[in-house]
Amino acid sequence: MRASGDRRPTARLRELGVILPQPPRPLGHYEAAVQTGSLLVLSGMLPLQHGAPTAVGRLGDRISLDEGRAAARLAALNALAAAAAALGSVDRIRRVVRVTVSMTTTPEFVAHAAVADGASDLFASIFDQGHTRVALGAYSLPLGAAILLDVIYELRIEADHVELEADHV
């Protein structure tokens, strides 16, 4: 379900009844988010709730497809929370540019795209424009988590809009 209209992300989250969690803290010596130009690049987001992963194990073994989708959605919510903490508001986000969903799987597991849709469906319900995506299997992820999400956002740069408008006067 793609968002429609020119509503801000906070309004769409409210309409969906979604409350962002507290942003997760980095697990090591790195930044959770770095802005460069009009992009906000996030470090890997895990499906953490109260500091612990909600899905531990491998998809196709201990983790079902539905549990994997839910974990990808939670990781996406954590990515939005990390962006809000870095920017002051998710309303500064224009769109999601790229999502990479890494997941621990059994060798036989092939439903990577269906699991990754847990994150993509959430983003599509909030932002008007689509995003690119990579979904892949991994042998191991931090804290034994089944999902790790990597997100790049394009930002609304209000000062750029003001300058452009002034140049056309």
Image: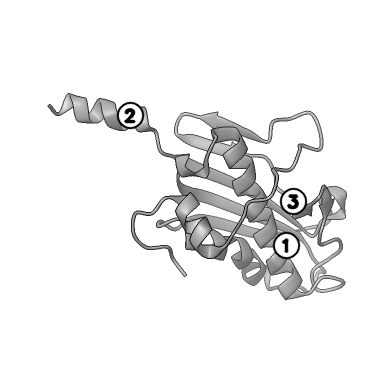
Q: Which mark is residue 34?
A: none
Q: Residue at x 70, y 73 (%)?
A: 110
Give the side of residue 106 with respect to residue 4, left or right.
right
Q: Crowding near pointer 2: few (<14 within 10 Å), some, many (20+)?
A: few
Q: Residue at x 81, y 73 (%)?
A: 60
Quadrant location of the C terminus in the rendered image: top left
- Label 1, label 3: how far apart the Cα atoms are: 8 Å
Q: Crowding near pointer 1: few (<14 within 10 Å), some, many (20+)?
A: many
Give residue 4's position: percent from left, percent from top: 37, 63
Give residue 136's position: percent from left, percent from top: 68, 59
Q: Which mark is residue 160?
A: 2
Q: Amino acid at mark 2?
A: Asp
Q: Amino acid at mark 3?
A: Leu
Q: Quickly name the residue at label 3.
A: 46
Question: How is the rendered protein coloured?
Answer: one colour
Q: Earlier in the sequence, mark 1 or mark 3?
A: 3
- Label 2, label 3: how far apart the Cα atoms are: 33 Å
Q: Earlier in the sequence, mark 1 or mark 2?
A: 1
Observer-nearest residue: 43 or 49? 49
Q: Secondary structure at mark 2?
A: helix
Q: Amino acid at mark 1?
A: Ala
Circles 1 and 3: CB atoms closer than 8 Å:
no
Q: Earlier in the sequence, mark 2 or mark 3?
A: 3
Q: Residue at x 42, y 63 (%)?
A: 3
Give residue 108's position: percent from left, percent from top: 79, 74
- Label 1, label 2: how far apart the Cα atoms are: 36 Å
Observer-nearest residue: 68 or 5? 5
